[in-house]
Image: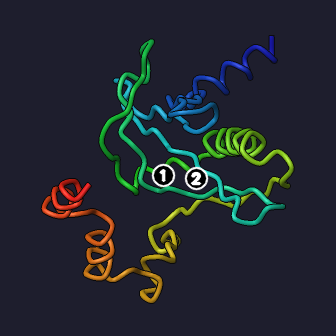
Amino acid sequence: MGVLLSLSACTDGGSSGLKVFPLQRSQPHDGLAVVSQPDGFGLHIYLETDTSKPDRCQPRWLPDPARLFNGNGTTPFSSGVATRSEFFAAVVRPEVRRALQQELKALCAARAPKARWHWIDPPTQASAVESLRLPAWEEKHLLTDPKQEQVRQDALVPKPSQTTDSASRQ
């Protein structure tokens, strides 16, 4: 009986009214639903992995969750963006943290089966959010000059007058 009670507390969030369950986006383990309101509203946390090091897989935190709808129904779905403060409030909860670890570990196993799993705590305040570094945008010398790119494209695509001239010569 005690086991049954503890299992039900894990699935429905216990007396807190919080409900946490996997909610797939495009592949198993890549999303987590956190129903925080009695009407079924909450968060859909998108789960991502960082496999930039071949021997290690760890969470890549996306602190901008989607808004969850119908979380108490048969077909929960998400749309739009929820607030970061809701994300921060959710990820400090032990039941959410356990579910995040479980889902992210499984996602890492699917995406990088030979890599070692490494847990990194989620950010719990705005100052702890690290921007995703995109080298092509941050290292200007790696970007192509748009005018030079247009010249190259124009050289590859023959103009209509060039195609009719070459066709008439044959």
Quadrant (top left, top right, bottom left, bottom right) of the N terminus: top right
**Residue drawn at the location 64% of the way across and 39% of the way down:** 95
| Residue drawn at point x = 50 percent, y = 43 percent | 45
Looking at this view, name the residue that lies furthest to the bottom: 141
In the rendered image, the quadrant that contains the C terminus is bottom left
Picture quarter containing residue 72? top left
Q: Is residue 86 left or right of residue 22?
A: left
Horizontally, is 117 left or right of 163 in the view?
Answer: right
The x, y position of residue 41, in whole percent, is 36, 31
Q: How many marks?
A: 2
x, y percentage for residue 7? 73, 20
Question: CB atoms at circles 2 and 1 under 8 Å apart?
Answer: yes
Is residue 109 positioned above or below 134 on the image? above
> Residue most toward the left?
161
Where disc 1 sits, the SS reads helix
Q: Position of residue 5 (x, y in %)?
A: 72, 17
Q: Which residue is mark 2?
A: 92
- When asked about the image quadrant of residue 162, the answer is bottom left
